[in-house]
Amino acid sequence: MGRLIVRMAAAGLGILISLWNIWGAVYNLLAPVPFAWMRNVFGDIVGFVIFLPLLCFCIYKLAMYIGLLRQGPRNAYGMIWEYSKTETTDSDGDTVTSITHTIRLNSGEMINASSIPQSAFQDGMMWPQFITPGTYVILTWYEKPFIPVALRPDPVHPVPATDDERHRIIDPTWRSEPTMTPVPNTVLAGTTNGTPSAVTSDDAVTNGTGADANNNRHVAQADTKDAAKDSESTPSIEKLNPKPFKRLNAIFNIIIVFVLAGVMLRSTGLTPFGIEGIYKRMALGVAFGCFAVWTLVRMVAQYVLLSVVGKTTTIRDHVTGDQVPLPQDTIAAEKKTTLIMHLIGAAIVAVIATFMLIGPVQTLIAGPQSVSVTYQGVERREETDEDDDTTSVYADFRFRTENGETLTITTDWDWRSTIEKQAGNNGNHLLLTYWGSQNNFFDHKLIFDNAKPDPKYS
């Protein structure tokens, strides 16, 4: 348990470090600065891209360790299956030691014992037994990831298994090779009316069971190959029991369609001016954010569903033909795949949503600005999309500040009347209120709020 606690502490520390760096990057990107050169945009973006996946990974690991702690360690019986130690010399002349140390559990699962720390061997005096093939042992460990707790001899089987016994453990139909006894070319194979019949070939007597033993051995080998093929082609839980997963997918697909449709329909009813213009620009980013949250919620729901359905789902045993429960490692592997795929998808969508929302959120935090300007007029501008040859028409309204800076506010040509009515004729002195900054790296377009006659010139 000590190693598990250490890993949980490391994952928690990784979460804190990731949150701190993500918060710092977001704060630096959103906080207003007097000059654009004071903002390290590239560094903040790189930090955000690096620490967001790290945060997801640490959260996933911490949740896994908490689950392991709740389930407790697993005990299983097995035996030392193989131990070999070889020494080779590399190109530099150094000696390289290679150790193969595996434990075969009674379920057939192979465990790499070379990754078990020395502290797990509770009795150091038993080390010669722990490296003796055939020794029966009891292994205690946490699963997924493999965290060993203890390895001790099995008191019920103090004597190591023989080679024949080990063969029968892995293949109950296994039979030892028959002893081939050579005989002369001519042997008495039987009698007919008292006359012996001869066999003139290089035949051999195999204790009367040679043919049967060979046939049985071939059948056993075929059964073993079929068993391996069946285990490799085990379908997923969703294919074995598709009904609850279809229901889950239908519910979540309906939810995301309604959410995205609601966000986009709400944005179409907003004007491109004032704070509504900011919300309108945020619509696509909010949609991606909703999709990221939906992905995380769906991940939790599917994880729980795999846990529940996996316990009641059965498969056909290739030996007995009976329906047996799914192996725990199969369920755990599918749950792990679900977590990883959903977390990666949510992280990618969250990064896209963040980049779409940074500019409008900066504008929203900075608030509106009011400056004295002189109206310079409006220009019609057309842009053609090279892919589908679609032409969009825009209206560029230009205002000159008292400092000589030109502010350009762009809107769709169909919305130009709103600004034209408030701006009036060219040369008018106005008090212009607008949102945004032309120095904003993520969104340099200005949003018109209102314009009224400048009281200084009234």
Image (cartoon, rainbow, N blue to C red):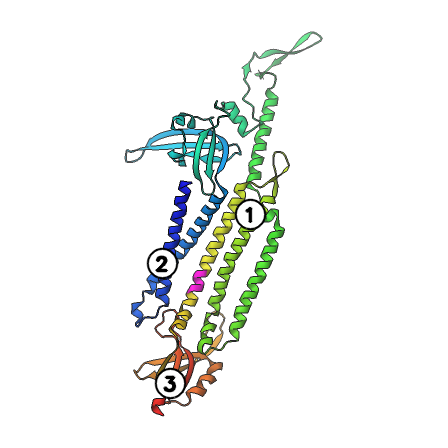
Q: Amino acid at mark 2?
A: Asn
Q: Give the side of residue 450 with respect to residue 439, left or right.
A: right
Of pointers 3 and 2, the one earlier in the residue sequence: 2
Please tell me which residue is depicted at 42% across the width and 64% down the height of the picture.
Answer: 354
Pick the front one: 110 or 212: 110
According to the image, label 3 marks what residue?
Answer: 431
**CB contact under 8 Å: marks 3 and 1:** no
Give the x, y percent position of residue 379.
41, 83
According to the image, label 1 marks what residue?
Answer: 307
Q: Amino acid at mark 1?
A: Ser
Of pointers 2 and 1, the one earlier in the residue sequence: 2
Give the x, y percent position of residue 84.
40, 29
Q: Quadrant of the C terminus?
A: bottom left
Instruction: Return the mark for residue 21.
Output: 2
Please tell me which residue is depicted at 40% across the width and 41% down the height of the picture.
Answer: 3
Residue 224 position (above or below residue 190):
below
Q: Amino acid at mark 3?
A: Leu
- Which element carries disc 1, helix, strand or loop? helix
Give the x, y percent position of residue 55.
41, 54
Task: Calculate the distance from the C-alpha at mark 3 to the C-alpha at mark 1.
Answer: 63 Å
Q: Quadrant of residue 174?
A: top right
